[in-house]
Image (spheres, rainbow, N blue to C red):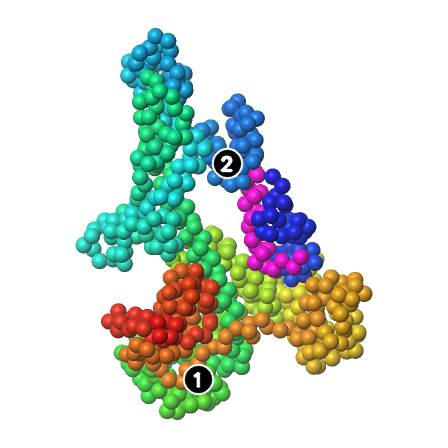
């Protein structure tokens, strides 16, 4: 297979671009580096396209390797024909290769193998070909000729037993034929139903909707597949695939050469046995596995998209924060942070039961706000959040109207605060204070703080604990890497956790950068990175453009212009009539494109690629621009609402906290997120909620229904619906 041609056709890309991208990947270049600094070679492929290409490249290479392995394995058995080899080499799916290999795969002793070893294969061939020896009137007459001493010793000591043994060979031959398997697989997937029943119909569980349930496999949505899988694992559901067995056997029979003769009933029975005993169980397992893989793949994609939106949330710059991590018996942990996230003060207040010291909490908040010039209060959304919010809301209304507050999702905060990383960062602080600090910093710079937490623990997915954890971690790691490099990193303030996601930087090199910074002071020039232990020339090439130095010796170091393009950037500035120092002093050259004229002409004169030049001009126009500034602003509150305040028809503004297959969960400021079902996201048909909303979006919603007993809120984004 010509892998480059296959990739180009499948992904709709030019062959030259695919060849260049594959070569760059094989050379060890990171995807963010290729996407940002090798656009000419790849035709401008972004990180998403490059990830897809890399994934398919890996699959196709594995496919080719598997073909070679299978050819060698079959050849070693002396059973490889030119036709079979051609079929294997022509396969475009791993499944097809495995289907072709199935008859030759070594397996435990089967009934058919035992019969073959007893010399009954010629009889099986007669049954298949419907050819009977002369002078035989019944199948048993023909089978009698094969009751040899060897066959008798193996247990085939009568014509009936010999005939049964030969039928076992036929059944296995039918069941292992690649074309039969492919056809019946298609039939099973197209007509099969997923059927579930309760193991105990009287038990109350979350799986009651599936206690007596059936749905066509081709239509069942992914979230239901995952729910059913979980119910089965927990022993609450029994699940099976329902297929019309008679129709399947008839379909299989039509695929097999048929002639009237004494063996016709034997062949019919063998075909039915091959399907029911050998094919159906395997195809049912395959279908269940395929649905699970499909559902998991989709869930991982949804999780990845949600994570990307969350990490791309707009930082709240200039926020001086009191961060509150609510609790009951142990109180509410307090961390006071300046606008850079530095800890100024910490302590505990008790606004909730059993102590409910509201007056003391108000006094503490007033003192901290006054002492440290606080402008924002952040509250975690976990246990006791609602009661804490009421006290904060009342305090702001009565005593500090200049303050604002917001609720922050605290998913993963406890994981970080108890981690080895947190212990290294803040060895003198207890776990609870670290947790409160993390909440405040999530508001100030979500990306910088959330990279410290395993992506699986951030809580913006569905059924994440049921997913393939290795694949989930790999995919989410790519998301974090892409977002970090898209935004860029200040090398003088970034943590080792953040630096570790920069293109070309390993965790060890990230720690070395921090250690170098602590020993030698702030970096003033990108070239100093070469002095960091283990940061060699290749790593420098990969990371330099993503690491920013504000206020350094070279103003270009504060931009995403790669050092390899500095000379081009200087010539562009010269033609625009400005210097690099002017760039720093003015915060960019807004009219630089007008100053330099035609990009195509300038690129030709400078010997620079057009796409690269466009990026350079964009950076010189607005150096170090943060793409997160385009994200929705954080919604702040000054007054608290309760679920008791909600009534159907009420209009609210909320923030999307999670997007799942069946809808979106929206925080409307009442502690309990409301659900906008997929059917209520828009007036038009919505294939997936992520087509309409993303995590972090600010949306207008209307209350449809409030179930106060169960704490459930139904919302709609379509007025009057």
Q: Is residue 349 above or below residue 166?
A: below
If you read the primary sequence from the N terminus, does the residue marked by circle 2 or circle 1 appear first?
Answer: 2
Q: Which residue is mark 1?
A: 404
Q: Residue furthest left?
A: 202
Taking 601 as reference, is 242 left or right?
left
SS class, disc 2? helix
Q: Residue at x 39, y 88 (%)?
A: 396
Residue 525 placement (x, y as % from top left): 70, 70
Q: Is residue 252 above or below residue 60?
A: above
Q: Which residue is mark 2?
A: 97
Residue 436 placement (x, y as % from top left): 43, 74
Please identify the dominant SS of the magenta region: helix
Magenta stretch bounds: 43-67
Q: Nearer the viewer, residue 265 or 600?
A: 265
Taking 668 as reference, is 558 left or right?
right
Q: Residue at x 30, y 80 (%)?
A: 645
Residue 343 appears in the rendering: no
């Amino acid at each position: 297979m010509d892998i480059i041609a296959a990739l180009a056709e499948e992904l709709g890309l030019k062959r030259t671009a695919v060849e260049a991208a594959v070569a760059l990947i094989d050379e060890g270049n990171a995807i963010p580096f290729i996407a940002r600094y090798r656009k000419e070679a790849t035709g401008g492929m972004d990180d998403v396209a490059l990830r897809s290409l890399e994934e398919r490249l890996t699959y196709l290479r594995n496919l080719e390797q598997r073909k070679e392995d299978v050819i060698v394995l079959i050849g070693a058995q002396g059973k490889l024909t030119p036709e079979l080899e051609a079929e294997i080499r022509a396969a475009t799916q791993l499944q097809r290769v495995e289907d072709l290999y199935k008859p030759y795969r070594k397996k435990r002793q089967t009934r058919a193998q035992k019969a073959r070893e007893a010399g009954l294969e010629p009889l099986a061939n007669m049954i298949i070909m419907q050819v009977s020896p002369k002078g035989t009137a019944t199948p048993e007459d023909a089978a009698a000729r094969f009751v040899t001493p060897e066959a008798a010793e193996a247990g085939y000591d009568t014509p009936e037993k010999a005939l049964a043994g030969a039928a076992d060979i036929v059944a296995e031959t039918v069941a292992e034929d690649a074309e039969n398997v492919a056809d019946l697989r298609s039939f099973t997937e197209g007509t099969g139903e997923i059927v579930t029943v309760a193991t105990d119909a009287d038990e109350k569980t979350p799986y009651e909707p599936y206690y007596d349930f059936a749905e066509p496999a081709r239509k069942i949505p992914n979230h239901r597949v995952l729910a059913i899988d979980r119910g089965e694992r927990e022993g609450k559901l029994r699940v099976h695939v329902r297929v019309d067995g008679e129709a399947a056997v008839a379909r299989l029979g039509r695929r097999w050469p048929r002639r009237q003769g004494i063996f016709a009933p034997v062949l019919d029975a063998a075909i039915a046995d091959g399907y029911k005993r050998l094919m159906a169980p395997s195809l049912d397992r395959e279908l269940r596995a395929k649905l699970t893989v499909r559902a998991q793949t989709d869930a991982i994609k949804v999780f990845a998209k949600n994570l990307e939106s969350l990490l791309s949330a707009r930082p709240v710059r200039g926020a001086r924060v009191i961060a509150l991590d609510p609790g009951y018996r142990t109180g509410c942990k307090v961390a006071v942070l300046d606008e850079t996230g530095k800890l100024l003060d910490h302590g505990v207040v008790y606004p909730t039961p059993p102590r409910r010291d509201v007056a003391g909490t108000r006094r503490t908040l007033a003192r901290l706000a006054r002492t440290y010039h606080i402008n924002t209060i952040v509250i975690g959304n976990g246990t006791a959040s609602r009661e804490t919010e009421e006290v904060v809301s009342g305090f702001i209304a009565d005593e500090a109207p200049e303050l604002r507050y917001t609720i922050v999702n605290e998913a993963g905060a406890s994981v970080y605060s108890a981690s080895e990383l947190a212990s290294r960062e803040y060895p003198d602080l207890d776990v609870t204070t670290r947790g409160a600090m993390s909440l405040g910093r999530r508001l100030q710079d979500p990306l910088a703080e959330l990279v410290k937490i395993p992506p699986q623990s951030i809580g913006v997915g569905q059924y994440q604990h049921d997913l393939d954890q290795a694949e989930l971690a790999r995919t989410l790691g790519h998301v974090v890497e892409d977002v970090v490099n898209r935004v860029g990193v200040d090398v003088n303030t970034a943590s080792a956790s953040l630096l570790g996601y920069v293109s070309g930087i390993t965790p060890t090199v990230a720690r070395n950068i921090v250690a170098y910074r602590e020993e030698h002071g702030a970096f003033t020039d990108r070239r100093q990175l070469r002095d960091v232990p283990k940061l060699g020339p290749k790593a420098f090439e990969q990371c330099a453009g993503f690491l920013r130095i504000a206020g350094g010796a070279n103003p270009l170091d504060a931009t995403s212009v790669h050092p390899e393009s500095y000379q081009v950037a200087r010539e562009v500035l010269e033609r625009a009539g400005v210097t690099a120092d002017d760039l720093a002093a003015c915060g960019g050259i807004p009219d630089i494109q007008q100053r330099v004229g035609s990009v195509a002409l300038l690129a030709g004169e400078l010997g620079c690629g057009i796409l690269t030049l466009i990026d350079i001009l964009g950076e010189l126009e607005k150096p170090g621009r943060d793409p997160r500034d385009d994200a929705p602003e954080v919604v702040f509150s000054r007054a608290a609402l309760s679920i008791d305040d909600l009534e159907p028809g009420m209009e609210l503004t909320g923030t999307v906290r999670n997007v799942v297959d069946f809808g979106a969960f929206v925080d409307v400021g009442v502690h309990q997120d409301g659900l906008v079902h997929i059917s209520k996201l828009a007036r038009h048909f919505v294939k997936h909620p992520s087509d309409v909303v993303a995590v972090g979006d600010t949306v207008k919603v209307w209350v449809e229904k409030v179930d106060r007993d169960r704490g459930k809120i139904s919302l709609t984004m379509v007025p009057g619906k």
